[in-house]
Image (cartoon, rainbow, N blue to C red):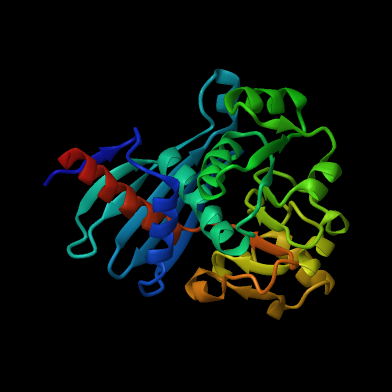
Amino acid sequence: MTIALISYEDGVLDWPGVARAIAEGHDHPKGQVNDLFLYRGAETLLNRTAWIDGLGIAAKVATVFPGNAARGKPTIGGAVNLCSDEDGQLQAVLDFHLVTKWKTVGDSLLAAMRLARPDSRNILIVGAGNIGRSLHDAYATAFPGARFTVWNRSRAGAERFAADRPGTAIATDLETAVRAADIITCATMSTEPLVRGDWLRPGQHVDLIGAYTRDMRESDDAAVARSRVFVDSFDTTIDHIGDLTAPLASGAIGRDHILADFYDLASFRRHDDAEITLFKNGGGAHLDLMVSRHILGAWQAAARG
């Protein structure tokens, strides 16, 4: 049996295709998902697993070694093992970073294509890291002609971003940039709210990616309360991520304020041009499986010519 070892993309993938794969993945029965963490001091081994009838099995293994940065080595590494749904045989080993990039950004792109106004032209990216660069590329495919602005805590980081993505403006004041944007997409590691509800105006779409624990958040209670709120998965967001746990705990919102996840994509739509929509991207191993299966299929098709 041939096992595919996939660590590159080389034009094989495109953002709309990945978004469609995530949407189609939710047509399958809801999968089993489980996470396991092991720790040695500041170092972490993360295992995320998913099994979806019709798509197969994925086991995503990641190591987090913060001390590697001082040694000039990557701090995160790992792979996704993709197995057949029919007989459980290993079909592919995919690079962790490849899957995470396309999964994370494709997740938010799917939501934006359904929740943001189609005429959105001013897109603000909060956070100038690698995910921010991929967000620029992905949103440019769905909103042709859009103008991009980046805000980053470090001016030097924003300047590097703008050099990599020519035409991107640099915001010096976050409030001003948020008020001017049609879409605000955040990919940071913030533990304090960045996007304030008082800054939002009718018609905007807010995309929150970075926070993934209860003590992390990119928005305040008012931003969530003012918005119609959607998530990729109820299971990976509501009880786990500060952008939702905090306003739920404070009483700023009730559970019914979170309207739908991707298993109810028909509800991902605007009622009018004036409302504010907010999407919380929580990730999850089921999404890694959906995207890994898509990557393998696209890679095999390209190999066949």
Residue 128 screen position, x and y as percent: 66, 34
Side of 199 relative to 83 (left or right): right
Residue 35 screen position, x and y as percent: 48, 58
Side of 200 relative to 284 (left or right): right
**Residue occupying image coordinates x 53% and y 53%:** 109
Residue 95 screen position, x and y as percent: 37, 39
Residue 242 screen position, x and y as percent: 72, 59
Seen from this angle, which residue lies furthest bottom? 256
**Residue occupying image coordinates x 48% and y 73%:** 263
Give the image quarter of residue 239.
bottom right
**Residue occupying image coordinates x 59% and y 28%:** 165
Placement of 248 over or under 280, stated as above or below? below
* Nearer to me, 228 or 26: 228
Q: Is residue 171 visible?
A: yes
* Nearer to me, 134 or 253: 134
**Residue occupying image coordinates x 80% and y 61%:** 223
Q: Is residue 238 visible?
A: no
Placement of 223 over or under 7, stated as above or below? below
Seen from this angle, which residue lies furthest right? 198
